[in-house]
Amino acid sequence: MKTTYASIFLIFLLASCSIAKSSVKNAFTNKELKLINAGDSRTPMRVYKITEKSDSLPLRKKSKYINPEPKNAALQLFVKRLYATVTDSASLGVGIAAPQVGVLKNIIWVQRLDKENLPFEVYLNPKIVGYSKEKQTVTEGCLSIPDRRETLNSRSQIIDIEYDTMEGEHKAETIKDFTAVIFQHEIDHLNGILYLDHLEKDFKNDKNP
């Protein structure tokens, strides 16, 4: 009987290890891994633009959950390359989302304009779980929509978010003012939404108050 239990435990342990290894390996598609591994951690990635037909399709797709596995080397490399992209002089911005470089996973970088020294921070699987009724009027641009900026009046002044960290912790936070706009903009990208979509809604609301 002891031998039987030991065998079952060993099989369970091996299966668990196999699943863990598989989840790390399969966190990204082969196409995404090719993009990620095309450069080192300091190499920016190409930003997808709506002006290119082949780019516009992934920009309109919903991104998927990413398991926050600290030992996932591909994840570690990708977040570093995504940071290199948003801080590169050729694609400098206050935020960027994974689908903007062709990787359909729920990952964003946001510059925390509400914190000392204005640091960039990475967020996995971010969700907005609460929107204030109070709105703010802001001018937005987008790395994926070149040479265009528009004024929106539908962004919430305050939002409540939940997210995972690179260390695998799940956290919640309340964000205000323009930093809240950055989060709303980048999380929109994870859902295949561009700020131009809000511009259309604002126009309709203005016509039908």
Image: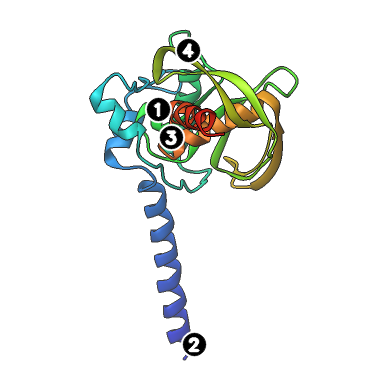
The residue that appears at 44% across and 64% down in the rendered structure is 16
- The residue indicated by pointer 2 is 2
Query: Which of the marked residues, 3 or 2, is nearer the chain's N terminus?
Result: 2
Against 89, is 115 above or below?
below
Label 1 near label 4: C-beta < 8 Å? Answer: no
The kind of residue on which mark 3 rests is: Ile
Label 1 near label 2: C-beta < 8 Å? Answer: no
In the image, 189: left or right of 38? Answer: right
**The disc label shown at residue 88, or none:** 4
The kind of residue on which mark 4 rests is: Asp
Against 23, is 134 above or below?
above
Residue 29 in sight: yes
The residue that appears at 32% across and 36% down in the rendered structure is 32
Q: Residues within 10 Å of mark 4 (few under 14, many from 20)?
A: some
- The residue indicated by pointer 3 is 193
The kind of residue on which mark 2 rests is: Lys
